[in-house]
Amino acid sequence: MTQNATVSIVDDSEAVRTAMSRLLRAADFHVAEFADAEAFLRSGCRDAPGCLLLDVSLPGLTGLELQRVLADRHSLLPIVFLTGHGDVGMSVQAMKSGAVDFLTKPVDPERLIEAVSAAIARNLAARAAHAVTADILQRLATLTPREREVLPLVVSGKMNKQVAAQLGTAEKTVKVHRARVMQKLKVRTLADLVHLADRVGIGEYRV
Amino acid sequence: MHQGPIAGRRDDFQNAPMVQFAKPSERTGHRSGRRKERAVGTLRAKRREAHDSKRQQLVALQRQQQLTHLSRVAMLGGLSGAIAHEINQPLTAILSNANAAQRFIDQGNIDIAELRETLADIAAEGQRAAEIIRRLRTLMRPGQHPRQRLTLNEVVQETVDLLGGELESRQVALEVALAPALPAVEADRVQLQQVLINLVLNAADAMQELPAPQRRLRVRTSAHPGGSVRMSVIDQGTGIAPHLLSKVFESFFTTKSSGMGLGLAVCQSIVRAHDGSLWAENNPDRGATFHVVLPGYPPKTS
């Protein structure tokens, strides 16, 4: 098995679960099976890397309801929906709510593998981006209040003299703050600082 | 030569041709000298009347069977979504299993035990699909099906198997309460299934406008003193206006915009043909219940 990613299959038909699980394992994926949405939520899988292969019609919490629950908790887990009904309205709703794909049964095995691959790739990228952002936010938290004032002004391209004037302080002081900010945020060039700030929405547009 | 459309009544369900009673060959009020002739003529007339009455019964029976078949076809048309869903499940399993096995082999991963299991699953799912189609074909068959000894519990179970997917997609929660040790009935299995399918789908329709968590449907069987058995379909819908409680069973009565109004009328005639009764009641809290009562087998001789 290549990546540390798990496909969570949620379908109340045991025959379908077993078969899709077998297929995905043959295609080199890790798989976890669940008979209903509640069982999936109780497991640790929803916070782990991977994706969700979800049947729309489930006993108890429905597939669409599970999608909403995950969205409410800002889950990064991508969802590939499955349905035995071919309901267009439902598929539109699922896609609008952020599903990666919507497949109708009987599912073409190649299509299934493609959809799962795409979903996992999307998840790994999202998790990586999320990790970077989290890391940046952590670093930002180490800035002093004054440093936090200096950062957006520097990033917006103002010269030290202008920053000093705006903040009512000496240019020398600004230089020191700027150096400390770069050090704490672990960047060496202004360009890197700008990228980092951009990443978390700090810039001329932020007050 | 006759050109253009031929006027006259078409032999369809609404306007079956009228059966003509033979006119008595004798007129009444003749002089006594004709009495013997009249007696013979009256005898002939009576025989002809009996013959025509029999023919009329046959026509009526034929019409009834056509109506039953039409209603069954219409019902199955409405079920097509449910049917497709039931078959899509085994098909999905078969395709996934087959592709998996092919991949394993291509990768040189020949785990005989797993491959054997995979093939067994494929076979089992194929059987499942075949069984669904077989059952549907049975339902589709026109004409009489033989009567057999069976229990209402079996009928309920088979109907639940057939309709499970459809009810789930409509987000109707189904609760089944089957009485243990239920006496058997002697009945046409397919016809009883048709009755129950009709009642269950009607109940689901009645609850369509309700928010999903409130769509609860119950099917109950129970035994009665005197040996009869009862099957009840209980919904939580808006109920039936009291003055319509018996009218709903009339032919061509429907409240649906796309309804044909044959379902309940046919159901009642099926139940009556089994010496049973079918009626509707409003529930004390909300919704309606349709009861089917049939005599148990062996019939109690009092």
Image (cartoon, coloured by chain):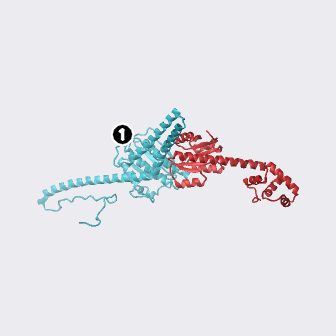
In cyan, which chain? B
Left or right side of A100 for A146? right
**Mark 1 secondary-structure assignment:** loop
Question: To which residue does mark 1 refer?
Answer: B298
Where residue B102 sits in the image (x, y, percent)?
Answer: 51, 39
Q: Which image quadrant: the C terminus of chain B?
A: top left
Residue drawn at (48%, 42%) of the image: B94
Of residue B37 and residue B154, the one placed in the foreground of this image is B154
Residue drawn at (75%, 49%) of the image: A136
Q: The residue under label 1 is which amino acid type?
A: Pro
Is the residue B284 above or below the residue A14 in the image?
below
How packed mark 1 is, by other alpha carbons closer than 10 Å (few <14, some 14-19, many 20 or more), is few
In red, which chain? A
How many labels, in total?
Answer: 1
Of residue B75 and residue A99, the one placed in the foreground of this image is A99
Left or right side of A112 for A164? right
Of residue B71 and residue A80, the one placed in the foreground of this image is A80
Left or right side of B131 for B169? right
Where residue A84 sits in the image (x, y, percent)?
Answer: 51, 48
Where residue B273 sits in the image (x, y, percent)?
Answer: 35, 48
Q: Which picture quadrant has residue B151?
A: top left
Q: What is the chain identity of the residue bearing mark 1?
A: B
Q: Which image quadrant: the N terminus of chain B?
A: bottom left
Asked if residue A60 shows in the view, the reply is: no
Where residue A161 sits in the image (x, y, percent)?
Answer: 85, 59
